[in-house]
Image (cartoon, rainbow, N blue to C red):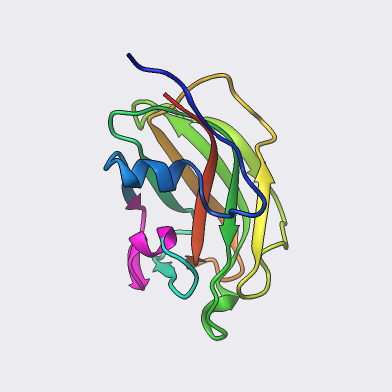
Amino acid sequence: MHHVKAFPRIPNRPYSGILTYCKSINSLKLRSGAASWKGELENILKPSGFYALFHSNETNHWIEFDFDCKVVKLLSYEIQSINDSYYSRYYPISWKMVGSNDRNEWDELDVRTNCRELQEGNRDAYFVCNLQSTKYYRYIRFLQTEGANNSCLGVSRFELYGNVF
């Protein structure tokens, strides 16, 4: 029998949510819209000290979370900026969190513009989705629409909070 499992953000246990759970049951695949430049994409699921930096000629970089046989209702998320003093300048400024079940139609779940919470290296920022949906999605994407360096997207950690079915 399938049931809904809730993953709220617990302040004294950061980065312990949907991504951590789905990785532990082998129901998570990661994709990026750009080639890795420094670090591997999977680094965003590891403790501090790792990071993933992507570079391309496109301005809209994205990271996709594919939940395989699960679906997710996204309520909030947490991001840590790159913890390397040189690469910390590659932080996201504006972005969208979007959800889909077919990778063709994407619903906006959160939109951030001119956000400076991740401006310095090794910064943690927590965001509640401002366009919350009642839908569950197989795919969630973080879509950077503006970065401090528009040819790059860099983060150290990422976690999603909400419900899994």
- Total numbered labels: 0
Task: Work out which residue is located at the far top of the displayed protein and give it.
Answer: 1
Left or right side of 155 for 22: left
The answer to if 44 sits in the magenta stretch is yes
Q: Which residues are magenta?
A: 31-45
In this rendering, the answer to whether 109 lies above or below 89 is: above
Horizontal relation, residue 26 to residue 54: left or right: left
Q: Estimate the x, y position of residue 4 in percent, counting from the top left.
A: 46, 21
**Would you place residue 138 above or below residue 39 in this image?**
above
Q: Residue at (41%, 63%) from the top-left corner? A: 46
Which image quarter: residue 21? top left
Q: Is residue 31 above or below residue 164?
A: below
Q: Quadrant of the C terminus?
A: top left
The residue most toward the bottom is 86
The residue at the far front in this view is 12
Q: Nearer the viewer, residue 11 or 87?
A: 11
Q: Position of residue 55 (x, y in %)?
A: 40, 68
Residue at image location 57% in from the left, 77% down from the top: 88
Residue at image location 57% in from the left, 85% down from the top: 85
The residue sitting at 36% across, 53% down in the picture is 33
Q: Quadrant of the N terminus?
A: top left
Q: Position of residue 122 (x, y in %)?
A: 61, 73
Q: Position of residue 108 (x, y in %)?
A: 57, 32
**Left or right position of 56 against 17:** left
Say if the magenta span includes residue 76. Answer: no
